[in-house]
Image (tube, helix red, strand yellow):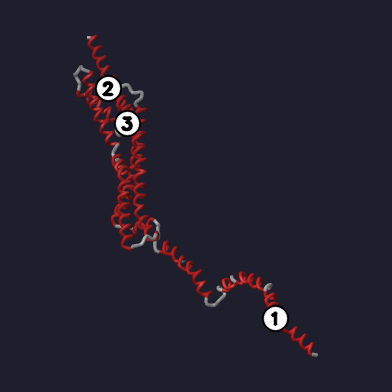
Amino acid sequence: MFRTVLKSLAVLAVVAFASPIIAQQAAKPVAPVVTQAAPAAAPAPVTAQPSSPAASPAASTALASPVVEAAPRPMVATGEHDLSPWKMFMGADIIVKAVMVGLAFASVVTWTVGIFKMMELTWAMRRLKAALRKIGESRSLSEAQMALGERGTILSRFLAAAMREGRMSAGISSDEGIKERAASSFGEIVRAEGRKVRTGMGILATIGATSPFVGLFGTVWGIMNSFIGISKSQTTNLAVVAPGIAEALLATAIGLVAAIPAVIIYNHFSRVTKAYMEIVGRAQGAAGRLLSRDLDRTHSSSHARAAAE
């Protein structure tokens, strides 16, 4: 009996002594599972934070705030500043407005002069060519005047000057003197016609040469005012800077609109005027030849009368 009790006590002592060891051995395989699950459990608070009622309004506000702030910006650029040409003109400085109005007036003058010069030179060239064809078969100044039948071209003035010189030089036997005086009269008529057909060409040249610089002056003045406005507002926002710069650049654009047609029209009519003056030279030569024939014919008839006597 006693031995049985001792055995039981010995077994209990062994079990009591071995239980911590068994517990430690039983906990060792579980520990890696806990440590391995810890990394997986670590991001759980991160993913769970947006779902928390305290964090979700702040996060949604932070995400939505850039959209709310960015939405009104295009409204400022398109609503407050209309960048159409008329609105830019109305919003420009008084000096820039004066420059734009002056350049617009110069453009109107350019096209007006161009249209009238085209009509004038076209009509004058057609009439002079037709007059030269009419006197092509004439043998004397009187026949040429009868064939011409009109007094509106420069050829009629050449013929009238030649006949007047012939009458005023009656009784003078020096043909060279008569031709020289007639050529002098012809030269005056040619110079007067040249001045007439070049009327308005100086205006075109002036507009073509000065309009870009006048427009540049308006641009410089407008940009200067824009920078002054920037310094006063203490902002470099493009919505604030762009309208003033656009209004200033509009002056340069109008200057080019006035200058480019003026230069083109001036160069065109320079060529047309040169061609017309060449036809005028042909008319002068025709009148001089008719005068020479009349002089030779007069001397021939006088020699024939002298021989008959």
Determine which quarter of the picture holds residue 283: top left
**Label 3 vs 2, first from the N-terminus:** 3
**Percent position (x, y) of residue 250?**
36, 52
The label nearer to you, 2 versus 1, is 1
CA separation in Å, label 3 and label 1: 137 Å
Q: Residues within 10 Å of mark 3 (few under 14, many from 20)?
A: some
Which residue is identified by label 2?
291
The answer to whether the residue labelled 3 contacts the one labelled 1, judged by CB atoms less than 8 Å apart, is no
What residue is rendered at 25% in x and 17% in y? 298
Q: Residues within 10 Å of mark 2 (few under 14, many from 20)?
A: many
Which residue is identified by label 1?
17
Q: Amino acid at mark 1?
A: Phe
Element carrying mark 3: helix
Of residue 103 and residue 31, the one placed in the foreground of this image is 31
Which residue is identified by label 3?
277
- Give the number of the disc on residue 154: none
What residue is rendered at 27% in x and 20% in y? 292
Element carrying mark 1: helix
What residue is rendered at 37% in x and 58% in y? 241
Q: Amino acid at mark 2?
A: Leu
- Quadrant location of the N terminus in the rendered image: bottom right
Q: Amino acid at mark 3?
A: Met
